[in-house]
Amino acid sequence: APRASPITDRRASAGGSRGARRMFIPKKNRIEVYSYLFKEGVLVAKKDFFKAKHDEIEVPNLEVLNLMKSLKSRGYVKETFNWQYYYWYLTNEGIEYLRDYLHIPAEIVPATLKKASARPVAAGGRGPPPNAERLREGGEGGEGGFGGGGGYGRGGGGGFGRGGGFGRSMGRGDSSAPVEATA
């Protein structure tokens, strides 16, 4: 009989062809993570496998990461990873799955799907821009706002784009300032 190599023995004992191991997560912790995810609609976790507890939930961070990896592989959450943090967003299929798993009625929806309270609007249908008062202070053709006198932005100088470029000295003053004659 052919002798099995240590590599194949290890793979067979791990439960998969790639050596992946399954993690036992207590049902209490699973329900706590799923409940938080359903309530908020999003979940954030630091990529730290040795962190004792998650920042928001009283569950080990490794369990949160593995539960969310499982939900992602089934298409129940979308994942974004940025600066060592995972961001997971519930999909519509994920909402249905968690609603069924947690026995939640259809009237209750995650916080991401709730309508935000609208800000007050003028009678014309649109509110004024946030800095409307500051724009009006300069008057019609005066120095402030969009009216003349130096143009929009950092003052005169002409040119295109954001300013600068080749041939402009940085130490020179504002080109729209009056030049004093010395004679």
Image (cartoon, rainbow, N blue to C red):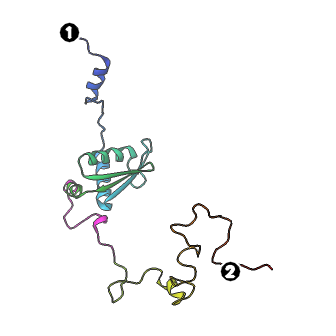
Pinpoint residue 172: horizontal percent, then vertical percent. Answer: 68, 68
Identified at 20% across, 9% down, the residue is 1
Q: Nearer the viewer, residue 26 or 97?
A: 97
Sequence-wise, the earlier of marks 2 and 1 is 1
Q: Which of marks 2 and 1 is in front?
A: 2
Which three-letter amino acid code belongs to the residue tagged 2? Pro
Identified at 20% across, 68% down, the residue is 107
Secondary structure beneath dot 1 equals loop
In the rendered image, which residue does mark 1 sit on?
1
Q: In this rendering, is residue 69 above or below 172?
A: above
- Extreme top residue here? 1
Is 139 left or right of 45, judged from the image as shown? right
Q: In this rendering, is residue 129 above or below 74?
A: below
In the picture, residue 173 is in which quadrant?
Answer: bottom right
In the rendered image, which residue does mark 2 sit on?
178
Question: How far is mark 2 from mark 1, CA to CA?
Answer: 99 Å
Pinpoint residue 47: horizontal percent, then vertical percent. Answer: 42, 46
- Give the magenta-colored segment's residue range: 100-117
Pinpoint residue 166: horizontal percent, then vertical percent. Answer: 59, 60
Secondary structure beneath dot 2 equals loop
Q: Is residue 110 magenta?
A: yes
- Extreme front residue here? 183
The image quadrant where one finds the C terminus is bottom right
